[in-house]
Amino acid sequence: MTRFAAPIAEQIWDMKYRFKAADGTPNDVTVEDTWRRIARDLAQVEEDKGAWEETFFAALEDFKYLPAGRITAGAGTARRVTLFNCFVMGTVPDSMAGIFDMLKEAALTMQQGGGIGYDFSTIRPKGADVKGVSADASGPLSFMDVWDAMCRTIMSAGSRRGAMMATMRCDHPDIESFISAKSDAARLRMFNMSVLVTDPFMDAVKADGTWDLKFDDHVYKTVQARDLWNKIMKATYDYAEPGVIFIDRINKANNLSYCETIAATNPCGEQPLPPYGACLLGSINLARLVTDPFEEAAELDITRLNDLVATAVRMMDNVVDVSKFPLEAQAQEAQAKRRIGLGVTGLADALLMLGLRYGSDEAAAQTEAWLKAIARASYLASVELAKEKGPFPLFDADKYLASGTMQMMDDDVREAIRTHGIRNALLTSIAPTGTISLYAGNVSSGIEPVFAYAYTRKVLQKDGSRTEEEVVDYAVQMWRDKFGDRELPDYFVNAQTLAPLDHVKMQAAAQKWVDSSISKTINCPEDISFEAFKDVYMEAWDSGCKGCTTYRPNDVTGSVLSVSEDKKTAPEVISRDGEEPQAPHGDVIYMSEPLDRPEELEGSTYKIKWPDSEHALYITINDLIVGGKRRPFEVFINSKNMEHFAWTVALTRMISAVFRRGGDVSFVVEELKAVFDPRGGAWMGGKYIPSILAAIGGVIEQHLITTGFIAGEGMGLKSDPQAKVVGLDKPRGKACSSCGQYDLRMVEGCMTCGSCGHSKCG
């Protein structure tokens, strides 16, 4: 029986991927059962099912090939779920009926667990004439708010957290509003946002030329291209969005440019897709393929790599036939092109095992060589599948081989494609792998550098106790097993110390041989100058990247916790007043015992009159003075309406218990405001409130603003002496929506929890 490399790996498997009956009884007793379940399901479309099941099992064994989470969790369970991670939806029509048809399709897709991407450039700008109704258009951002509300509704109905990507062209008249939308931290929280940047726009930026903002060939405004570029850069510098997608470069390089036009991506950007396109993802674990790690003879076994890639391509091609799809249009699109996205994880660990410093010229060259080998093996494997099962239906040899990517391929690969065709139109992509990387023993994620060599994590047990465990990077643990306490060499670098341009160098090296795109975060220090920050994006453009996503700690999205790196030990979690902290979130101080209640407290009482309720609700919030500052301590909710009695008492006790634990409790407001009543909400004070619970959340939020506990609506903690990063006068940031721990970090374009692996994209 396989032993997991770390306790966190087994916990991830049990929580996310282990197949269980409705009552919680495991169907997968061991991880081998999980691999067997996947292998058997994906072999069902083969003529020799038994032989291919064994081949597929061997690829999965020891975490060498890692299918994306949807496949690992869903294959072979007989559940009506999609095995595709995410979708780009149909083109949004510029009509009210068409827009809401698209909204319905999005809801149906998200209901099955699929993330979605949309291009909102097709909706006329705010203020444009709406023919036939004597009205002005409300613009694409108003409809994005509707999508955002829909995503919250699906999420509150019990599905996994929704993930959406919104794109807008750089020449749309509302692009400036799109750029600044995320400056309001309470708005469009369900969306990742990216600007579709064209080649002519980048030329205009470099030449300091003018730029027309237009819709349907009507120019609404002319701006300086460099000014608009600077607005994009400043927004990203200040609040981490929007990202940048070089859309013309994507379309020119697309193998299918002869039969599709791309205008959107999946939520994390690694899959630029046409309308109704779907992303099918999996990763080769490079960290498992290095022989003689940390020795002079260390190398990646190319023969094993080629064999593993061939098996992975076949498994992923079978997923197209095995998976369910939320919409028929998505099934037809997948069948017509059979696009897959095979990528890698553990790259940084593999480089460390070879003695290469991530970000160095040598590491970039090695990365390019490995990615070329994977691309070559993928295309040849797909040719073999075409010989056996036929090429994808829309294959046209001359047009396909004329595409930008195919021009780079070796002559023997091109000749094989011309002679036999190819089964899968596109084959490679590098997706976020945060969760599956933890599951595989905490290997480095995707092509990212190692985030932290080690950190200490406390785990809440079923009996209420907490156990402490060290979470160690896979390569670091291998070093320890081999060399004991010997100090890590200088080539061990991490995301905290790596220069931003080194990130770009690695992304560009990988992108050269990836026919789709890459999900990667370029971590920037908080004190990076604005000019140096802009240089990162210009270098991404100049070096051939298809997009760029950065993360700089900021006041809107919160600070990613710094992890103090020691070459021999994991970071400590520092306790308060000699006590054991309640939970380990980086270097954060927490309270271990509830606050004591004094005899008298200051407070305020608020009245809510909900339209469907005969009697008003009265909400009393009492505050405690801690360190000269007011913080919420308890809540009481009263009403003459006995219909609400049980849940108001429960809510009172629960919120008060949370408040008395101290720290940043503003997440209570966010959770209440996200609750939607399926019977409908109500208009109060000129705002639509989705439920009575959301109304209560709004009252608590206003109280916290008034008392100075939070900075403003949706802005989170203002000042709390119980929740500071040690040595820094900064709040601890936001809690993970899955496990509640404050260990969120930006990885591969998505906020990812280091404690449980949860991310919006994975």
Image: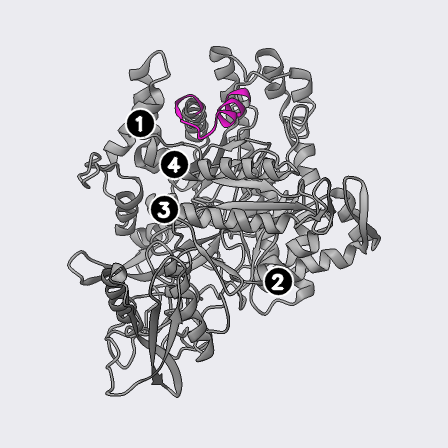
**Part of the protein shown in magenta:** 320-336
- Whole-angstrom CA distance, mark 2 to mark 3, is 34 Å
Q: Nearer the viewer, residue 557 or 676?
A: 676
> Which label is found at residue 319?
none
The mark lying in front, picked from 2 and 3, is 3
Residue highlighted by disc 3: 157
Residue highlighted by disc 1: 57
Circle 4 sits in a helix, a strand or a loop, which is it? helix
- Whole-angstrom CA distance, mark 4 to mark 2, is 33 Å
First in residue order: circle 2 vs circle 3:
3
**275 magenta-colored:** no
First in residue order: circle 4 vs circle 1:
1
First in residue order: circle 3 vs circle 1:
1
Residue highlighted by disc 4: 70
The residue type indicated by label 3 comes to Ala
Tell me the quarter of the image containing the C terminus. Answer: top left
- Whole-angstrom CA distance, mark 4 to mark 3, is 20 Å
- Category of crowding for the residue at label 4, using alpha-carbon neighbours closer than 10 angstroms: few (below 14), some (14–19), many (at least 20): many
- Category of crowding for the residue at label 1, using alpha-carbon neighbours closer than 10 angstroms: few (below 14), some (14–19), many (at least 20): many
